[in-house]
Image (cartoon, rainbow, N blue to C red):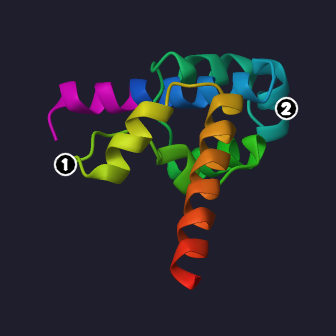
């Protein structure tokens, strides 16, 4: 992997960590404390200046109380843009409230369809 791609991935991971931290209304200091890391280090990670080790990544996801899957969920572009990928693309930058609303609409449509099939 070229250095250019590595630094872009590091930046994307940092941006994702920052977005998740802010969604949880955590300061960098709070995330650092919860992750057993130094506040300056968390800032460097979020700015894409530090390349995380797997051990440190584990600490960060623990501090955010999320899974690794959730952290990496929207980092890279999907190779094949199927319907699910299009849904994700539409919702990824929306607020948590908008995402929950879309989820409720989708559940309602699916329940309605299942009810139609049973009748």
Q: Of 18 and 74, which appears nearest the observer?
A: 74
Rendered residue at 56%/56% (across/down): 109
| Distance Cα–Cα, label 1 vs label 2 | 37 Å
Drawn side of residue 46 relative to residue 62, left or right: left
On residue 79, the disc is 1
Left or right position of 53 against 11: right
In the rendered image, residue 72, in percent from the top left (x then y), is placed at: 47, 46
Question: At which x and y percent is residue 50?
Answer: 48, 26
In-front residue for pair 68/110: 110
Residue 65 sits above or below residue 5 on the image = below
Q: Is residue 95 above or below residue 104?
A: above
Q: Could you tell me what secondary structure mostly forms the magenta stretch? A: helix
In the current view of this chain or complex, which residue is farthest to the front? Answer: 119
Q: Quadrant of residue 34?
A: top right
Rate crowding at label 2 as few (under 14), some (14 to 19) or many (20 or more) other CA atoms within 10 Å.
some
Q: Quadrant of the C terminus?
A: bottom right
Q: Residue at x 49, y 33 (%)?
A: 92
**Magenta segment:** 1-10
Residue 68 in view here? no
Q: Which residue in the protein does label 2 denote?
A: 33
Image quarter for residue 43? top right
Which of pointers 1 and 2 lies earlier in the amino acid sequence? Answer: 2
Helix, strand or loop at label 2? It is helix
Q: Secondary structure at mark 1?
A: loop
Q: Tell me, yes or no, whether the highlighted magenta stretch contains residue 9.
A: yes
Q: Does the magenta segment cover residue 21?
A: no
- Estimate the x, y position of residue 97 in percent, counting from the top left: 71, 30
Residue 34 higher or lower than 12, as above or below: below
- Camera-near label (1 vs 2) is 1
The reply to whether residue 9 is visible in this rendering is yes
């Amino acid at each position: 992997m070229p250095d250019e791609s590595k630094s872009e991935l590091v930046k994307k991971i940092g941006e994702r960590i920052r977005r998740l931290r802010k969604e949880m209304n955590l300061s960098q200091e709070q995330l650092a404390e919860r992750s057993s890391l130094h506040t300056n280090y968390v800032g460097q990670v979020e700015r894409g200046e530090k390349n995380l080790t797997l051990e440190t990544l584990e600490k960060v996801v623990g501090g955010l109380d999320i899974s690794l899957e959730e952290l990496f969920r929207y980092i890279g572009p999907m190779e094949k843009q199927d319907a699910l990928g299009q849904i994700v693309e539409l919702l990824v930058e929306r607020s948590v409230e908008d995402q929950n609303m879309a989820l409720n609409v989708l559940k309602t449509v699916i329940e309605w369809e299942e009810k139609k099939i049973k009748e």
